[in-house]
Amino acid sequence: MENFWGIGKEAALLHENSVVWDSHGCMPQSMEHLPKVISKLSQYRDAGVNIAHINLGDSYYPLDSLVRVAAYLRHWIKAHDNEYQLAASVEDIYEAKKSGKLAIAFDIEGGQALQDQISLLELFYDLGVRWMLLSYNKTNLLAGGCHDEDPGLTDFGRLFVDEMARIGMITCCSHTGYRTAMDIFEYAKNPVIFSHSNPRALADHPRNVPDELMKACAGTGGVQCINGINLFLGGEIPTTDMMVRHIDYVCELIGAEHVGIGLDYVFSSGVDPDFSSEEYSDYWPPEYYRGSALCDDTLFSPAQLPQLTEVLMKQGYSDKNIRGIMGGNMMRVAKQVWK
Ligand SMILES: [Zn+2]
C-alpha cells in the first residue's frame, strides 16, 4: 500500500484498516450552491474516511429544502457509484470500504421542519437519514435548545424518540438544552449520541457539554463525537493536538469505547448562513459567536484525520481504542439502532 498521507507506515496501515467514520459534515444546504461544491466529498475519500454523515439542513431550513437536498445528494451519489455509495445499512459500509468507495448517510439538525407530522421520520429514514436532532439551539415543540429556555423533552418529543427507535434512526443530543438531553438519556431505550460536541470543561461554550451529560450519554451505550471547529475546541487554530486533548478528556471521563469523531467540517463556507448571520442571530446568539468564522483556518479538516490516527498511536492509545474512536464505536451504535 502506498502511503499518501505523509504519516508513518504503521499508522497508515492502522488508519487504512480501521472503519473511519465522520459523524457530521456540512455541504451547502441549498440547491443554488450544492451542485458546485458536492465534488469536494472526495476530501473524505482521500483522507481514508469510509463513512460520512452529510447534513440535509439545520433547523431553520423548511421541509421542501430538506427533501430537495436529499434528492440531489442521492441522485449524485448514484451517478458516481464507482466512488460513492449510500449507507442504508451497516453492511453497506463494509461493502463500500471493501470496494474503495465512500459510504454516505444523512442527518438532520432539528425536528422543526417536520412540525407535528411524525410519519415524516420514516420517509427521511428511507431517504438515508441515520441520525437526527430534536432541536437545534432553539426550543421547539419537541425539545429544548442549548441557546434557549429549555422546558425539557416534551410529550410530543417522546413520541419522536419512540418512532426513531422503531424505524432505526439514532437520536442525537448535540445542540440540545441540558434538561432535554438529560430527559432523552433517561427516556431512550437505544444508545444516544452527541454527533458533534466537545467537553465544556475544555472550552466553556454553551454548545459544549458538561461532564454529567457526557456520563449520561455513555450510560445509554452512546458515543460522543469530537467537533473540529476552533470555537468548540477552545483555540485559534484547530490542531491535531487540540483534537487529541479533547479525545483524552472524554476517554478519561467516560471510556474510549464512548468516543468518536464528528468534525462538523463546513464545505459551504461563504455560501450558507454562518455564525455571523444577523438573520439567524436567534440560532447563533452574537454573545457566543461574535468574531468567529467558518473557514479553512478555523476548521479541522478531514485531510488531517490520518495524522490524528498517528498522534493517537504516539500517545500510547491501543490499536483497539484507536479503531473504536476513529469509527468502530459508531459502528457498534449503528449495529444496535439501524434497521
Ligand atoms: Zn451542528
Image: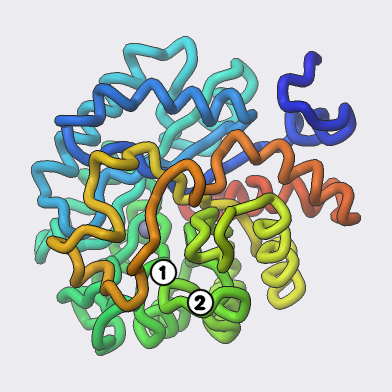
Point out the tag, 1 or 2, that comes first from the N-terminus.
1
Residue ID at (48%, 58%): 195
Residue ID at (52%, 52%): 262
Q: Cβ of disc 2 within 8 Å of ligand 1?
A: no
> Given the current orientation, which residue lies at the most extreme front position?
291
- Which quarter holds ligand 1? bottom left
Q: Cβ of disc 1 within 8 Å of ligand 1?
A: no
Horizontal and vertical percent position of residue 49? 59, 33
Q: Please give the residue where the numbered disc 2 appears in the rendered image.
A: 209
**Picture quarter containing residue 8?**
top right
195 over 89 or under it: above or below = below
326 over 113 or under it: above or below = above
Horizontal and vertical percent position of residue 105? 41, 38
Horizontal and vertical percent position of residue 152? 30, 86
Residue ID at (46%, 83%): 186
Which amino acid, mark 2? Val
How crowded pointer 2 is (Cα within 10 Å; few <14, some 14-19, many 20+) is rated as: many
Horizontal and vertical percent position of residue 103? 49, 29
Q: Which quadrant holds the N terminus?
A: top right
Q: Specify the label residue 173 is tagged with.
A: 1
Q: Specify the label residue 11 is tagged with.
A: none
- Check disc 1 and report its element: helix, strand or loop: loop
Q: Are marks 1 and 2 in contact (CB under 8 Å)?
A: yes
Whether residue 175 sits left or right of residue 97 in the image: it is left
